[in-house]
Every structure is written in structure tokens, then in C-alpha cells.
Amino acid sequence: MSKGTLYIVATPLGNRDDITIRALKTLCSVDIVLCEDTRKTGTLIAYYQTTEPFRLMMRRDGHPRLISYYDEVEEQKLPEIIELLESGTNVALVSDAGTPLISDPGFLLVRECRKRSIPVSPIPGPSSILAALSVSGLPTDKFTFLGYLPKKQGKRITLLKKIMILLTDEITKSVILFETPRRLQKTLADIQEVFGNREIVIARELTKVHEEVWKGQVHEAIDYFTDPKGEFVLLISRN
């Protein structure tokens, strides 16, 4: 019996029109979709089922089976998913938005699939990292993505000092970070402590109704984002 394939499917950041034809075809054809939130993914798939011309691609027997697959249960559910793939079941992995595995669950699954020679196929599409960088006006030829900074200030400061060395030595020209609304002000204050008033770019709610790409000095960002809301991508300039 041939093994199934694990598809890593990128989904829209916010604007549902950003879905790719290949992503839709994949979600139509697989038996199971692993998702961080079954409600969000179910709503997304249901939307396409009622939208032309995508409606014609969708499964006639309704949704694929949706399985909740988030950080806290990834290790626990890993044997079940591997067994399904080994038995010939095709599985798609999606995150709530954007490209899976980028600060989202899936690493353990992909690693195990590679160990067992289970096919893994990328279905590329939206990525908040590249979307933010492409409109930032910062250098794009050498960049470093570091995900979320540590929650503890001491560790955060230590990492920021290492980032400054990377930028100073021109090992990288732009650094990209994720941050939550709750921690944004603390992170900006720490960036100011380490970098001074370095130019930064903050992208918020990319492709959504309240999309915003803000550029300026760190102290200006602290004054501007006094009541932060949404999803944030921070970019630190070399200069």
C-alpha cells in the first residue's frame, strides 16, 4: 500500500481572495485537514464552497474531516496522524492564517514524516513575513526572521543585543519579528534601550480591513501604538 502525502497548505492572512488555486484543489482532494482552530478553517472552507468559480472545485461530499492540531496537542496526536499517512490517507496541514510551521505547529509532524519517508509537499502562498518585508522599504536581499522574542525581559534584552551585532556586522540587513498586542509596548521599550532611536517598520493586520504599515523611529512607535490591536510584524533596519 502506498503512503499518503502530507500537504503544507498556506491560507490567506485575512483577505480570502488571496487563496491560491492549488491550495483550493488540495483542500478539495484530501481526506483530512489538520488545523489550529477547526471553527476558523471550517468557516474558510465553507466560504469557498459557496463562491464561484471555487465552488465547482469543492468536494461533492462536503467538508474533508477537520482535526484540531495546535501546539499543546501536537505531540499527543502525532502517532494518530502518522498512522493515517502510513495507511495511504492524504492529509493537509493549515494554520489559522499564512504559511504553516512559521511560529505555528507542524515541525514535529514534518520531521517524523521525513524520518519515515512519507511524502511532504508544500503548497506555497501567503506569508506575513514576506508580505511585511516587501512593503517595508527596508533591504530585502539579506534578512533574518526570529519569530517571537522571549517573554522575560532579561532574555529579550540579551537577544536584542545579539541582533544588533548581526546588523552592525552586516551579516543581515533587516530583522523581522512577531509580537502580540499585549507585549508590543514592552518590546518597543527594550528595542529603544538596546538600539536607541533606530528606524523600524511595524506592519499590522496585513491584508485585513485595518491593514497598516507604519515606519518611523522607535520612540515615535511607542507614542503611536498606545492601544495596540491586531497581529504585528516588526522590522528593524540596519541603519
Image (cartoon, rainbow, N blue to C red):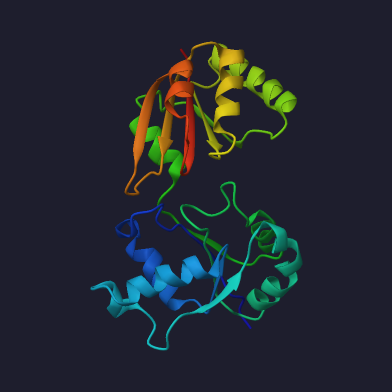
Residue with the most extreme bottom position: 61
The answer to whether 27 appears left or right of 68 in the picture is: left
Residue with the most extreme left position: 52
The answer to whether 42 appears left or right of 171 in the picture is: left
Percent from the top left, x then y, of residue 11?
A: 43, 58
Instruction: Find residue 163 and report its image quarter.
Output: top right
Instruction: Find residue 109 and report its image quarter.
Output: bottom right
Q: Residue at x 72, y 69 (%)?
A: 77
Percent from the top left, x then y, of residue 157?
A: 68, 21
Q: Residue at x 62, y 76 (%)?
A: 3
- Using the rendered image of the protein, determine whether residue 89 is visible from the camera's viewpoint: yes
Image label count: 0
Q: Residue at x 27, y 73 (%)?
A: 51
Percent from the top left, x then y, of residue 200?
A: 45, 22
Name the quarter where the N terminus is drawn. Answer: bottom right
Say above or below: 133 vs 119.
above
- Using the rendered image of the protein, determine whether residue 26 is visible from the camera's viewpoint: no
Percent from the top left, x then y, of residue 31?
A: 52, 79
Say above or below: 233 vs 45.
above
Q: Depth check: 46 or 121 in front? A: 46
Q: Depth check: 53 or 225 in front? A: 225
Q: Depth check: 131 or 149 in front? A: 149
Say above or below: 151 vs 206.
above
Instruction: Find residue 185 and report its image quarter.
Output: top right
